[in-house]
Amino acid sequence: MPNWLVVRGKYLYRRIYNKIRKYRGKFVAIEIETGDYFIGDTVQEAIAKGRGKYPDGKFYVTRIGEDVLGARGAKGKVKDIVSCKFFKTDISTPHATAFLEKDAIRLDLSLIGKCDTWNGEAIVDTGFFGGVAVPVALAAKLGLEHVGAGEIIVADGGTVPVDIFMGKVRIGPVLMDASYIVIGDEIVVGMEILKQFNMKYDAKRQVLELEYVGPPVVRRIKEKEVEEDILKKVVEIFRRLR
């Protein structure tokens, strides 16, 4: 199925690229039948916006300007995590811990579909922009909801089409919506999930402590509310001084 969706989706993407190129680095979900498109900071956000208008639609999803969903096989290097803008030197409330093992970062989580839940360990891949990558057998067992397709770069540098699904992920006490792709034989967590956490690296214990802060859209709303609250307080102070 992904081949037809990708061919059609890439055609539509090329037609609208000049309109959306200013959003480089964000994700676009293009509804295959209508060509209508939706922009988001993550794969999940772009698809969620699209499904708000087309609940039964199928979407071609890609990262604007890069034309793929990322690369599989980069794994999670500690230096990559530490260099990310969401890395913090201190966090207040760790919700989960990831461990460095055999030059890879491993994270305990639960993958949740309509039919089943899987509990276990996943590898962090900083080159993968999506939520979770799973083998086809696990996707079928979970009962994930198929929503579209995209492309991903594999180890040899080529691109392959992949199906995109929606499900949920639980990390510690935090339950979140997530996009899934079906590829390979490993369970992998991508940047869509990681960007919802602040992190602190403990070199002595070789662990990452994760503190949930929410998806980018939620953080933007919170930041705006804080800014508005500060502005109101400043205005009130000036009123009192007059």
Image (tube, helix red, strand yellow):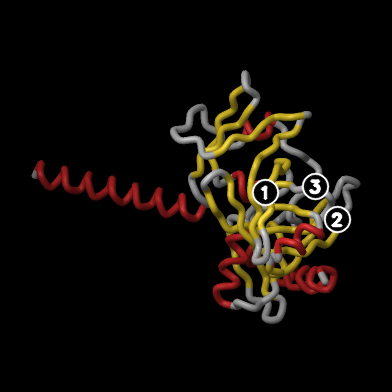
Which residue is located at x 78 percent, y 68 percent?
A: 10
Q: Is residue 165 left or right of residue 216?
A: right
Type of amino acid under label 3: Glu
Q: Whole-Å distance between the Cαs marked 1 and 3?
A: 14 Å
Q: Identify residue for label 3.
A: 186
Up the image or down, 87 lies above or below 120; here it is: above
Q: Identify residue for label 2.
A: 159
Question: Mark 1 falls on what kind of element?
Answer: strand
Question: Mark 2 falls on what kind of element?
Answer: strand
- Residue 119 has which mark? 1
Residue count near mark 1 (Cα–Cα under 10 Å), binned few <14, some 14–19, many ≥20: few
Residue count near mark 2 (Cα–Cα under 10 Å), binned few <14, some 14–19, many ≥20: some
Single out the residue that lies furthest toward the top: 204
**Percent coordinates x, y for residue 48 in the rendering:** 58, 66
Which residue is located at x 61 percent, y 53 percent?
A: 169
Is residue 130 at least partly visible in the picture?
Answer: no
Whether tag 1 and tag 3 are in contact, CB under 8 A, the answer is no
Q: Which of marks 1 and 2 precedes in the sequence?
A: 1
